[in-house]
Image (cartoon, helix red, strand yellow):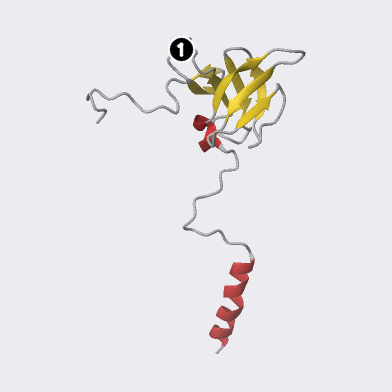
Amino acid sequence: MRNKMRYLVLCPLLFLTGMRDPFQPPEDLCAAGQLAQWRYHGMVKGNTGTGILQDGKKRWHRVTVDERVAVGWRVTAMDEHELTVDVGEKCEPKQWTWQREGTKKSEDKDSAVVDGAQSSRVGRRPQADHPRGG
């Protein structure tokens, strides 16, 4: 009888403490999974430069330096060719750089910035030798 009472008290207590559903993926507080879906389309010059970003849902965003993007990233640098955001100190990667659409400056379109140097081919699928990509 005592054991049944313990279980009866313990089970609701576990549910009330906010256990995470083990079948759901963990919450992405950094939104790092969305980085490769966003596109930088350029910059409009004026008193302050305004960058034009498009998110994965094809919505447009106007951003300036030191402004926070809707998902929590902070724009740290911007010019005509690329835009850099600070994803967060506890996030990996900590910074992300998008190149403007149509720029042939580099083979790497978008990339993570690791220790001040951009890593190669981040967020892109590897090239296959097979003609159909298989």
Image: 79 above or below 58 = above
Position of the N terminus, as image quadrant, is: bottom right
Which secondary structure, mark 1?
A: loop
Residue that extends furthest to the left in the rendered view of this protein: 130
Numbered label tally: 1
Residue 126 place in picture, x, y as percent: 34, 26
Q: Residue at x 55, y 79 (%)?
A: 7
Image coordinates for residue 130, horizontal then vertical, percent: 22, 25
Residue located at (57% from left, 74% from top): 11
In the rendered view of the protein, which quadrant contains the C terminus?
top left
Q: Nearer the viewer, residue 8 or 65?
A: 65
The amino acid marked with disc number 1 is Ser
Residue sitting at x 57%, y 16%: 82
Picture layout, residue 91 above or below residue 16: above
Q: Mark 1: few, some, or many residues within 10 Å (few <14, many ≥20)?
A: few
Q: Position of residue 27 (x, y in %)?
A: 56, 48
Q: Quadrant of residue 90?
A: top right
In the displayed orientation, state which residue is furthest to the bottom. 1
The residue where tag 1 is placed is 106
Answer with the quarter of the image where residue 30 lies.
top right
**Residue 44 as seen in the image, left or right of residue 5:** right
Which residue is most to the top? Answer: 105
